[in-house]
Amino acid sequence: MNLKSIAAQFSDVNAAREFFEKQRWPGGTVCPHCGVIGESYRLTAKEGSKSPVRPGVWKCKGCRKQFTVTKGTIFEDSHIPLNTWLMTIHLLCSSKKGVSAHQIHRMLGVTYKSAWFMVHRLRYATTQDPLAAQLGGTVEVDETYIGGKRRSSKCLPHVQKLGERPKDRPAITDNKQAVLAIVQRNGDVRSHHVQRVTAKNIRPILDHNISPTATIMTDSGTVLHGAIHPRVHHQVNHQEKEFGRYENGLCITTNSVEGFFSLLKRGINGTFHHVSKQHLHRYLAEFDFRYNNRKITDGERSCRLIGKVSGKRLMYKDMMPKKDGPTILQA
Ligand SMILES: [Zn+2]
């Protein structure tokens, strides 16, 4: 599957809908109302009837209710044709550093507002399954800061140095957003937007995502050490220009997580330019999804994403800044 074949094969909306039906219901239609499998039939206009039937409507024999393939998915209530959705999915899944809403708007001829909403709904669909298994084996953990202007304590003497006690002075990272990433070596990544990198904030994230028997590797930051204690923990000392060492046949390094961050930063700096902090967690989900499905083809990745669109709704109003108080960020 590539853009050319999608354009040729799915120039017709009905063909795209049939493709989604095959992807969503490989073992027969599943009624989204009552869950009965394979007991639905396609509604067609009766002979001689003047009232037309909307294409793609199914009727369940169990509960007698009607539905289409978009019911209960991120596509529900969308006026964008399904073949445009399919192309957007492919662009999002095949662009290593992501694709911006402006790019979709220009390439596919949808309004910027529609494009923005589409890519955010798709990002939402890439979100990690909350019941996913914990990461195990060798696990690398690190934090990075995204956005904001770099403030150096050298040119701005009133700016607090890293490690200094917070007083009334702004910290170097004050206008940046902290991202914590956990990477299983040769495996998956899970990244989180955290309000502040403190042992208290990070410990629950680590406990939820990392198996108790895992060996954890970080750089020499003391905050992470506090959050990881008393688990098995190795540190690599970046300040001493050490980027990896071998101990008893085990390579102690954080190069995997650094590699993920470099991809994320190239995406945010090069593709999106600006990411609002209230939406950052969705961009992280998108980058996690592509990284976790990096060993398959673009077409297979697109199908994986189509497999994740069910049971998720994201309304436009939910994405707007909350009027009452600051937006609550993901843990
Ligand atoms: Zn039913």
Image (cartoon, grey):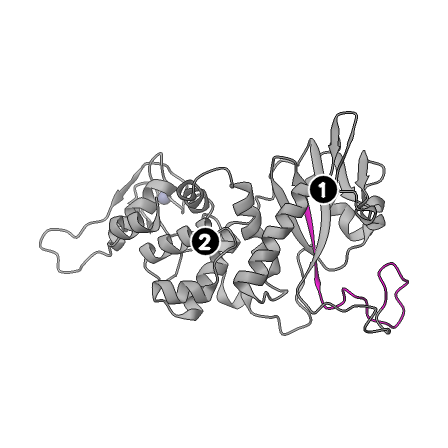
Give residue 79's position: percent from left, percent from top: 35, 63
Asked which quadrant contains residue 186, the reply is: top right
Q: Bounds of the magenta span?
A: 160-181
Give residue 82's position: percent from left, percent from top: 33, 55
Please say whether residue 157 is visible from this viewpoint.
yes
On the rendered structure, is 286 left or right of 107?
A: right
The quadrant of the rendering that contains the N terminus is: top left
Q: Which of the two residues, 220 or 128, is positioned nearer the viewer here?
A: 220
The prevailing secondary structure element of the residues shown in magenta is loop
The circle drawn on residue 254 is 1
What residue lies at 25% left-to-right and 54% top-to-bottom?
11
On the rendered structure, is 269 left or right of 4?
A: right
Q: Which amino acid does label 2 sit on?
A: Leu
Is mark 1 in CB contact (under 8 Å) with mark 2? no
Ligand 1 quarter of the rendering: top left
Give residue 259's position: percent from left, percent from top: 63, 46
Count all numbered tags in the image, as a single digit.
2
66 is higher (above) or lower (below) than 324: above
118 is higher (above) or lower (below) than 64: below
Badge 2: residue crowd in 10 Å (few <14, some 14–19, many ≥20) = many
Please say whether residue 58 is visible from this viewpoint.
no
Give residue 224's position: percent from left, percent from top: 80, 47
Which is nearer the N-term, disc 1 or disc 2?
2
Marks 1/2: CA–CA distance:
28 Å
The circle drawn on residue 92 is 2
What residue lies at 83% left-to-right and 68% top-to-bottom?
153
59 is higher (above) or lower (below) than 150: above
On the rendered structure, is 205 left or right of 45?
A: right
Q: What residue type is labelled 1?
A: Thr
On the rendered structure, is 80 left or right of 202?
A: left
What residue lies at 35% left-to-right and 34% top-to-bottom?
27
